[in-house]
Image (tube, rainbow, N blue to C red):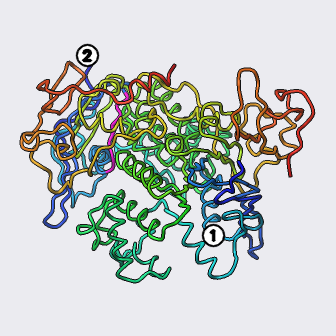
Amino acid sequence: MTDTPLFSVKNLVKHFPVHGGLLQREVGRVQAVDDISFALNPQETLGMVGESGCGKSTTAKLVVRLIEPDSGRMELDGLPLSRGRAWDKDFRRRVQMVFQNSFSSLNPRMPIASSIAFAPTIHGASRTKSMQRAMELLEIVGLDPSLYGGRYPHELSGGQRQRVNIARALAVNPDLVILDEAVSALDKSVEAQVLNLLADLKRDFGLTYLFISHDLNVIKYLSDRVVVMYLGKIVESGPVEAVYGMPRHPYTRALLDSMPSVIPGKRSDHAPLTGDPPNPINPPSGCRFRTRCPHAEPVCGKAVPPLLEPIGSASQQTLAGHEVACLMHQRGSGHSQAPEGEPVREAV
Amino acid sequence: MDKPILSVDDLEVKFVEGKKEIHAVNGVSFELFRGEALGILGESGSGKSVTLRALLGLLPTKKTRIRGHATLEGTDLLNARGRALADLRGNRLSMIFQEPASALDPIYTIGDQIAETLIRHEGIEKKAAWTRAVSLLDEVQIPSAAQRAKAYPHEMSGGMLQRSMIALALACRPSVLFADEPTTALDVSVQIQILLLLRQLQQERGMAIIFVSHDLGVINEISDRVAVMYAGRFVETGDITDVFSQPHHPYTTGLLGATIGAAQKQERLTTIPGMPPNLAELPPGCSFAPRCAYAQPSCEVDFPPLHKLGERRAHRCLRVARGEIALHAPHEQSAAQQEN
């Protein structure tokens, strides 16, 4: 794609030291996010999916700059971040986040209309104007402003509070909204309402979403492109049709196979994976999935497989933008199931 | 048919908070047979967990009013107190919970906790109890069970803890197991392992399960029969395939429609408008009427009795019972397409 992505991340790394022992020395490092790169194109929804401990939430916090990365580059509109105080303030306006816990992310002592109006006043709007905007936004997210505007967070249900959080994020006219498990705590019937709302808002406001969830169904429903993470690494990424329709990485396949069946009379007869995801403190060498992978070979432990376009076969065509970090799909990688030929060098 | 293991008749649970009465469970009746898996499907606040807890005597007695009858193989459940209740729990009737980390005691090893149950109910020696504990952990597919029995709960991962809790619950070969959203806190790849394990253990032991969940997929994987619960009542019951492929209550259709399993990408989801009712002020008629697309003014006034369709199928919708409306499973076509 020739267009500049709205937001891009290159070789992002974030490790958390673990202290222990008598002297509280560093005894290990949680490799929460380890060398990941992805880009968000304007007005698209990028879904990020993975199990607990895979680094999805750390990625979200890095993108909104709640925490600083150890290394790596992030760019907004193709320009590096941190360009002076005024720019930083504008960054905070342009990139907004909605959290999973709808209650703890609202000030319990502030009526919800004031919570929504708070950020615009920080960014220079007058008090009356911000309040007016807050009332409009409540209407947009489907809450009657005259009825709900003066209420406190504890007087609302989970679904209503999440609508407030969405309105609050939109109050400063952001370009990018990060939704970290934003619908995970909601009941199914309410979740569907909020998902419809998110789809409407994206269309009406021209928003770009980074949608993070462990729920494969929700990701499939909402996303244009998908990134699958495992223990701090991206294992597969691409258009949603490719990743769900022709998954290549054994982990993605196992994850999709693990979904409970909703088709009446049809049940799963085997579990694709055994055991739990390993601890991200000391991840396996090479491919991090190899300890649970049915196709693992000694070569998988030698080097971290790069994220590359999979080699298409006659039966499987590769869609543009589909990338997978698995030696089985890389020419001359040394894996017995890999296609023959010269290895492809990773473009630096 | 055989006699049911567990039969519950017109169970009512009310929570008293000052002058307010919360009607959590409003007349639930069902029968559970040997080796049967009953799934209770409902959203938060529908009373599904409260039903299980009331049957097991786990609700605070001071604040709760329980009415109705429940018998487990002839034993009265709701009036059991003290020793009689303690003899029952963890022995003939067991329960596994959503959060294994908070359900297990953090200061005893997994093996000790299982052994304790065996000693209490079967009066066996400590050594024999420990051996049994290890073999139980082995049975729930915990690798190197002899070592893991010596582990404390905080040393285990979520999936391993849930397996340990299953081992603990099954230690005394209960005839009925209550499972309260046991897979909700787990990752998908672990969830399916636990579901398959429960299914296998149930079949091997001929045990009956009541499995409570808000997740249609999970209910579909484990249950023979399903009860859809709304505002403290079963609004529809029947064999799982019948209910999911031909729902007879608008709430069931709504739930099926709001589940995105088979929905096409970017197609609008059919939602149930509004919110569940306030359990302190339930309407006199059908409690789903305010959110129901098919509701008529009479639905809000007339209470819908249970309309039985044959031995195993029933629902509480006045209009469906009168044959005024016919419901269809949403996404039936797309689900069939996905299968092909």
What chain is tagged by disc 2? B
Looking at the image, residue A26 sits to the left or right of residue A122; the answer is right
Residue A280 visible at all: yes
- The image quadrant that residue B40 belongs to is top left
Task: Identify residue for label 2.
Answer: B1
Q: Alpha carbon of mark 2 to alpha carbon of mark 1: how far? A: 64 Å
The reply to whether residue B94 is visible in this rendering is no
Disc 1: which residue: A65
Residue A302 on image: x %, y % = 88, 43
- In this view of the protein, which residue sits in the foreground, A216 or B210? A216
Q: Residue furthest top?
A: B1
**Residue type (three-letter) at the residue carrying disc 1:** Arg
The residue at 41%/65% (across/down) is: A167
Residue A84 x, y percent position in the rendering: 68, 81
Q: Residues within 10 Å of mark 2 (few under 14, many from 20)?
A: few
Name the spot of residue B288 as percent of width and height, x first: 20, 43
Q: Is residue A1 magenta?
A: no
Q: Position of residue B64 (x, y in %)?
A: 21, 56
